Every structure is written in C-alpha cells, then in structure tokens.
Image (spheres, rainbow, N blue to C red):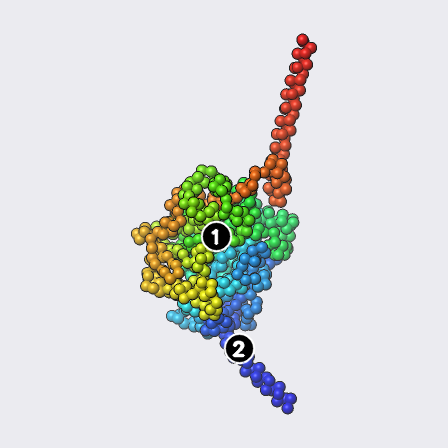
Amino acid sequence: MRSSALEYGAFLLAFIVFPARCQEVVIDAPAGPIVGHPVAADASLHVFEAIPYALPPVGLRRWRPPEPHPPWSSAYDGRGRGKSCPMIERMRPHTAAEPAGMSEDCLQLNVWTPSAPPTQQPDELLPVFFIIHGGAFAFGSGVTEPFWHPVGLVADQRLVAVSINYRLGALGWLAHPSIGETTNFMLLDQKMALQWVQTNIRSFGGDPSRVTLYGLSAGGQSVLHHLVWPLSEPLFHRAIISSAPIIEEASMEEAYKRRGERLQRAVAAKNMEEMRNVHWSNLTAVQPPMPFCPLVSGRDVQMASYAVESCPVVDNNIVTHANLITLAKQGGFQKKPVIISTADDEYPLLLQFVGHTEWQKLANATAEQTRRFVANSFGRDKATKILHEYESVLRERDPLAMANAYAGDAMFSCPNRRLAMELSKRRVPVYTSLWRTILPPGNPLGAMHGIDWRYHGHIRQQLGQDRRLQDMGQDETDAWTEGMYLAGLGAFVRGEAEVKMGNGVVWETTGEANGYATLEIDRGSIKLVGDTVNERHHCEFWDAFATDQAYSERQPFAIPPDLFGPPPTIAQQLAALLTSSDEPTFVSNMCVVCVISTVLIAAVLLLQWVMGGQGKRGKGADKTD
C-alpha cells in the first residue's frame, strides 16, 4: 500500500515537472551546450541567460583586456546565475530595480530567440539586435535588469537579440601609469561580446552577417566609438545611436590624475598590486555618485566631484581622437547605415541623478544669479551670447528650464545633428529621428532622455500584462505609436531597401538634398519633417560656437559656491582651501595659502619698515629744531 502511494506520488511529480522540462531547449554552440527557457511574458520566446563570454576579470585580470571564456562540455544553464557588474553604490537607488548580486564575475550576456529550437538554415537565419545598455558608464545591467530585456521587440519583429554586461566605473575605465596605455576596458569587453556573437549566434538562429548595434546614452556613446574603431568594423553592420552625449574625451594625462592617482589614494594602496587586491565594493564606495563625463575646470567648485571618472580615454589605440565630430569631418567613420536619435528634453532626467539642492533654488533665482550661473559655466563672453539666445526661455519659464534647455542642446541635440550632417556629406546613410513623446502625459521631465527605448516593444507587452499601466497614461495610442515605429525599425535592421513605417511613411536618409529630413515621433503621430532639431534646439547658434570648441569645453553646471548667498569672507575662503579632501587640490591650495601668507607678511613688514622710517625721520626733525 505504501509502495503504491510512493509510486503514485512519483507519477504525479513527473507529470508536473516533465512538461516544464520539455519546454527547455538545449542548443549546441561552439562555446558549448547552452540551455534556454521560455520567457515568462511570452512562452513562444526563449532566453538563454547569463552566458559567460569572457573569463572573470579578477585578480591579475583586473584592469586588463578581457580574455575569452573557454568552451564547456556539459550543458550550461544560466538561470539564477546572472550578475550585475559592480556599480557605484550611490547610484543604485536610481536604477530600475535593485541589482541582482553584484560581482566582478559579470562578463555575461543574454540571448533572446523568437522560436525554439532555432533554425540554422542559411536562408532562415534572423537579423541580430545587439544591445549596449546605458547608465553613465557607472550603473546598469543588460543581463539582470528587466528594463534592458527586449522581449517585445523580439516577438514583434522576429529577430535574435543579445543584451550584455560590461565593466563599469573605475573597473571599466581606469587609467594609471602602472598599466601604461591600456584602458577603455568597457569598449574591449563590448568588442569581445561582439566577437562571441560572430562565433556563436548562428547556433541560436541569428545571422552573423546582419548584426545591428544599438546603444542608449552611454551605450550610444559606446556605439560611436565602435563606428570609428577598425577592430570593431567586421563585427557589426548597422548601428543605432540613441541620446548619446557627444563630448570631448579625456586625455591619458587627465585620466591619470582624475582616475588612477585619485583612486589609489582613496583606497590607500601603495601600488597597482595592492589596488588589484582591494575588494570591488571599496572601489565603488569611493567613486563620485555621478561620474559626469564633461571636463570641468578647477574653478568649478560645486561640480568638482563629478569630474572625468568613467568615460572613454584617448589612448591612441582604441580611442584615437578626442572630438568625434572632427573625426567625422576627416572621414574617420565607417560607412555603415546608422540611425541617430535624440529626444526633445534630454537633460531634465539626468538632473535627477545629480542631486544638488542648488537645482531647487535655481527655479527661484534672480536674473543676476542666472547671469552669474551661466558666466561661471562658459565664461563672461559666451554667457552673454547664451543668455541672449535663450532669453525667451528664461522670460517665459525659469532659470532651471533654461539650464535644461541649453545643456540638452549643447551636449545632445545639436552635436548629434552636426554629426549626422557631417556623415551624410560623406555618403554615410544616416537616418535621424526626434522623439517628442511624453510618458506619462504631463510628465514634468518632458520627452525625456532615452524615451525611445520605451517604444521598442515594452508598451504593448506591459499593457497586455497589467492594465493598470493605462492609469499611468500608457494606452492604445502609445501601443499604436510603438507598432508603427517598430515596423520601420525592423525594416532597417533587416537591411531592406526602403525603411517604411507601419503607417506608410518612408523614413528617408537625411542630407542637404532633402533639407536634413528627420522622422518626428509623438504619441499617435509619426511623420517626416524638415530640420526640426535645428528649429527647436538653437543648433545654428551652437554650431557657431563649435568653431571655438564650445561642444567640448562647455561646463553647463558650474554653480558658483556663493550663487545663493553672500560671497565668502577671506577667512572662509582660506578655511575652504585648507580643508580640501582632494590631495592634489590640497597641495595646490597650500601653495596658494603660502603665497598669500608670504605676501601678507611682506606687506606687514614693509608697512612696519615704512612707519619705522617715518618715526625716525620725525625724531631727527625734533632734534634739529
């Protein structure tokens, strides 16, 4: 009786478990056998999770180029093994979800397929969509964060998608004299993942000859560098650059000072050997909370902690030129079809990560405070021109709105437009788009940075799962917009001769012949317009500044320390100089204090000597009388 009960229980267990196991698929790739599982949101899709594409960059491999992961023999199942690369701790509350187990052993990727088992017939292979996540080169994960999972896109357009991790922050971009010219480890990681795709993606039904590189924000900045890096050229065939900041990259000398030497002091390491033994959590803990890429000057007191920390470095190997627009003029870009996309309101979202209380005060700033704010950022001469150009914004709204406008225009909208113009002049097929969708409607952040990624299959997928999203303003209008856009995106990714949107609008390449036509996307509207980016974002004004390197030298958030209060006294300034926590700054400040002290002492001695001389002359006169 007991035996029969056990047998019956085993039968029921097999009945429950076996169908679930049957839904698994194992593909045999050059990397080794890999297990895939149905996607929870859409069981017709499969995901192969957390596949290691490189050896863990730990110990002696930290701050060295990635090494390919050797093949394995037994089936690899990545469920529950996904890791996020170490992020700056103070950025974690701002991410879409709490990172799943951070670890340096994070060089992994996910592969998403629309069918299982995937076909490997040459005429049935699907285009590949390769995603480089954003996050200021400081946070984010293409493996563990659902925000970067392209489920809706894969289902809608029947393509194979790959989302990756790469090293972040100091672990990704450290420059240090002890490692010579070797840096830009993030770009090296991305290239190795692309090489893995070329070797293995056919096993997943993907076509290695039709790889589209997609990057948002810092990911878009990465794509730009792959478009000028000869070693990346054979690894992909089309590119999409979304909301990429186009700025001048740091020199090795600047990076040594701002990254390597500062980090070594912060963790109290004597040499590189000791730095490689420091736990990653101690490295991320001492990094600034928002490692902004633009260079800042020594006079920028408030933003000094956000100086160059995490962006690419001109190493004359991977990154050979500081200014990408200049490189485009010289014909340095690969002639591959490219989409360059920006949003109408690029900067307000980024301010959420900065966290300065001064930004709240800017909304109520006086005209004089606004003038000082801009002058401190750009210098007096340029500030006068900027204030005149944005006078209507300042008059109709507030200083914060003006700062958002000119920073977004100077760093995103206008340099991306200029890049598109320069590439089109050199016969590069360039498609430009401007996103004006606001989600939810009335969002004070406007058509914000990265809004286009929401329309890559996320809206209809989530509407189908949770009707409460309609209460957030996402409705069938957004679903229609997404569907119409994805039809055109799919045509681009597949390499079709005509990029036609779902509503019949043909997305033309931009250029002088058609007045630099741009695809404008809004809720319920997709249409081809003229040079609307220039019209809405003061680009002729910024292009004129580009002749004196305004694109690269701008410092859009240099708030003077006394902007919202009385100027500091001499004693307060000396105290600030003496209490600097940054060693080079402290040393230089001490020099300044010494010079000031010497001058003051000399002045006192001179005064005493003069007064003493006058006294002696007075006594002599008395005796004569």
**Quadrant into which the C terminus falls:** top right
| Residue 409 drawn at (x, y percent) | 43, 49
**Left or right: 78 in relation to 478:** right
Identify the element where label 1 is drawn. helix
Residue 550 in the image: above or below residue 104: above
Inter-mark Cα distance, 1 to 2: 47 Å
Quadrant of the rendered image containing residue 395: top left
**Quadrant into which the N terminus falls:** bottom right
Query: If you read the primary sequence from the N terminus, does the residue marked by circle 1 or circle 2 appear first?
Result: 2
Quadrant of the rendered image containing residue 337: bottom left
- Which residue type carries mark 1? Pro
| Residue 64 drawn at (x, y percent) | 56, 55
Give me the residue at 43% from left, 62% from top: 455
Residue at the disc numbered 1: 348
Give me the residue at 51% from left, 56% from top: 135
| Residue 14 drawn at (x, y percent) | 56, 82
Between 557 and 10, which is closer to the camera in this rendering?
557
* Number of disc labels: 2
Give me the residue at 35% from left, 63% from top: 501
Q: Is residue 201 visible?
A: no
Q: Residue 455 shows which numbered tag?
A: none
Between 616 and 79, which is closer to the camera in this rendering?
616
| Residue 394 drawn at (x, y percent) | 44, 45
Identify the element where label 2 is drawn. helix
Q: Using a 10 Å C-alpha cutoff, classify the residue at mark 1 as few (fewer than 14 neighbours), some (14 to 19) or many (20 or more).
A: many
| Most distant residue in the left direction | 513
Q: Closer to us: mark 1 or mark 2?
A: 1
Between 522 and 269, which is closer to the camera in this rendering?
522
Q: Using a 10 Å C-alpha cutoff, classify the residue at mark 2 as few (fewer than 14 neighbours), some (14 to 19) or many (20 or more).
A: few
Q: Residue 21 shows which numbered tag?
A: 2
Q: Is residue 131 visible?
A: yes
- Which residue type carries mark 2? Arg
